[in-house]
Amino acid sequence: MLPLIAFLAGTLLGSFTNVCIYRLPRGQSIIRPPSRCPKCKTRLKPWHNIPLLSYLLLRGRCAYCGNPISLRYPLVELLSGLIYLFLFFHLGLGIEFPIYALFSTALIIISFHDLEHGLIPDIITLPGMAAGLAVSLFLSIKFLDSLIGLLVGGGLFLLIAVIWKGGMGGGDVKLGAFVGLFLGWKYTLLAIFIAFFAGAVVGIALILAKVRGRRDPIPFGPFISVGALISLLWGEKLIQWYLTYLK
């Protein structure tokens, strides 16, 4: 029962995450007005906003104007639900669960914002860093590890930005620092390695498929977020596997 509750909570937060992804870049309030169809502007009924289920019942179209609903909406809800479910199995229902659940929600918002607009929103990362410092006292990682994680995450991306002009933006630097505060330096290093590995694989695949050119920029925020989530959920196992492999 508890795993199901964790999944459903994730889908509910995923629905709110979609609101943030749509409204933040447009400078709109994420509280008011209530949800509306972006095409016909008609206010949606509560049963039009049931995570996952409403999309299926409406067959992916607005109930009023028939405009197609972006596949991003159910995708984000499902992704959020699955992440919350994995977090529950990894952390249980202790104090760390809600902290890392909100951390994960922030990463989803950042990822889709970067994918759609090529920008990592300061309105998420800067308050997120302040929150990371505040809650680090309640996390299993030590406060000093959290501070070093900030320096490692932000510092590495800053170094890349300085050495390789245009290689990283200021948003990536802040996101690295944000991730570092919540993961600590060890898991942040792993997250960065995963991010670069995944970015390289996807980048090469896009070039070979002629979807992107060699000089076309690829948003890196989603790769940092994926690296952070993998490191958070399975970092210890990956590190132990690597150390065993070296022996």
Image: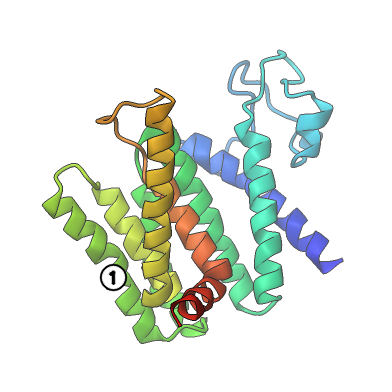
Residue 27 picture location, percent across and down: 41, 36
193 sits to left or right of 41: left
Q: Quadrant of the C terminus?
A: bottom left
Q: Is residue 230 above or below residue 218?
A: below
What amino acid type should be assigned to the residue bearing mark 1?
A: Val
Residue drawn at x 37%, y 29% is 207
Residue drawn at x 56%, y 74% is 237
Q: Residues within 10 Å of mark 1 (few under 14, many from 20)?
A: many
Residue 104 picture location, percent across and down: 54, 59
Please tell me in which quadrant of the rendered image residue 97 appears: bottom right
- The answer to which of 6 and 90 lies nearer the viewer is 90
Q: In which quarter of the image is the N terminus?
A: bottom right
Residue 169 visible to the viewer: yes
Q: In this view, does 243 lie above or below 179?
A: below
Q: Which residue lies furthest to the top in this view?
A: 65
Q: How many marks?
A: 1
Residue 34 visible to the viewer: no
76 sits to left or right of 62: left
Q: Is residue 134 above or below residue 157?
A: below
Residue 211 picture location, percent across and down: 41, 24
Residue drawn at x 61%, y 20% is 41
Residue 120 picture location, percent across and down: 36, 45
Q: In this view, does 37 lie above or below 46?
A: above
Residue corresponding to mark 1: 152
- The answer to which of 130 and 171 lies nearer the viewer is 171
Residue drawn at x 58%, y 67% is 233
Q: Which residue lies furthest to the front in this view?
A: 247
